[in-house]
Amino acid sequence: MTGITPSNDLIAMSLLQGRGELGVVTRDKLDELIASLAPESLLRALDPLQLHQLLHTATGRDLKPGEAIITQGDENGDFAVCLISGVLKISMVSASGRDIILNYCEPGELVGEIAMLDHGPRTATVTAIVPSTVLLLPGNAFLESALANPASAAGIMRELARRVRQVNLMIESDRTFSMAPRLARALVRLLDRDKGAGRLRFALSQSDLGAFAGLARENVNRLLADWEGKGIVAREGGELVLRNVDYLIELAEFGEGG
């Protein structure tokens, strides 16, 4: 099995048994999974009882690097994906044909919930960039859990409202910020807080970094070369390292006039 860490042995146990179900594990193991969920995960908005019941309906799946679990435009939007281990890339192709990387997800995060909730086509493609393990959460089971009591329904609405607010802020910054702040924001989002020392969570090509920041590769190359000359970033064995994290955080938040 690939992409399964000891802390996720509850998933490994069920997959090795060929069942892909969570019903065979103990409540303690299920609690470990819940504790690993990202703070902003839509799953955390559910009442604990409903969340336990929902996870018992999930099925597990291993993904190889480059394998897509969700494809943009697909009409089959009846499930969401919870990442257990590995890294997932969320990307889309714009109407003009431009590749856009919306986000990179790490363990504990949920993706694919938009189509699951509104039954529309998938708005983005979700691809593993390293060996990864995911849980597939059935849409009907999620809705049952969300509507099971007022606390779960209210939690879901609060989280969705928070996301709308976050998207509005991102759109506003994209319209007002020049290239340097947009690249800085992308780098700050990729910063690995656990590693420290300005390390990124994973290495990206300049093309992917540009698609993530909404910039052409040539502009990314020019900005990085300028920052490298000023000691703001550095390259160590092909890895990009942020030397002046505080500067990049301020640039990302306030722009060049900040």
Image (cartoon, grey):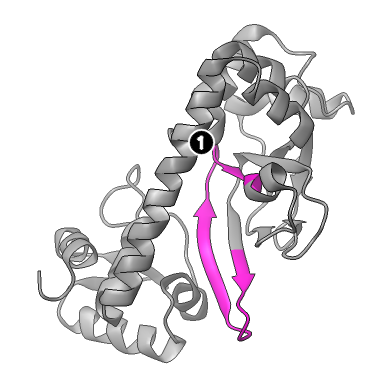
Mark 1, other Cα within 10 Å: few <14 / some 14–19 / many ≥20: some
- On screen, residue 87 versus residue 121, left or right, reads left
Compared across the picture, whether 174 is left or right of 59 comes to: left
Amino acid type of the residue tagged 1 in the rendering:
Ser
Q: Give x and y (percent) for residue 133.
A: 69, 41
Considering only vertical position in the picture, is 152 above or below 235? above
Residue closest to the far top: 27
Residue drawn at (46%, 36%) of the image: 159
Residue that badge 1 annotates: 41
In the rendered image, residue 112, in percent from the top left (x then y), is placed at 66, 48
Position of 135 relative to 67 (above/below):
above
Above or below, 35 against 251 in this view is: above
> Does the rendering let one see residue 182?
yes
For the point 19% across and 84% down, which residue is it?
A: 229
Q: Residue, x 79% and y 43% (percent of image)?
A: 78
Quadrant where the image shows the N terminus: top right
| Range shown magenta | 91-113
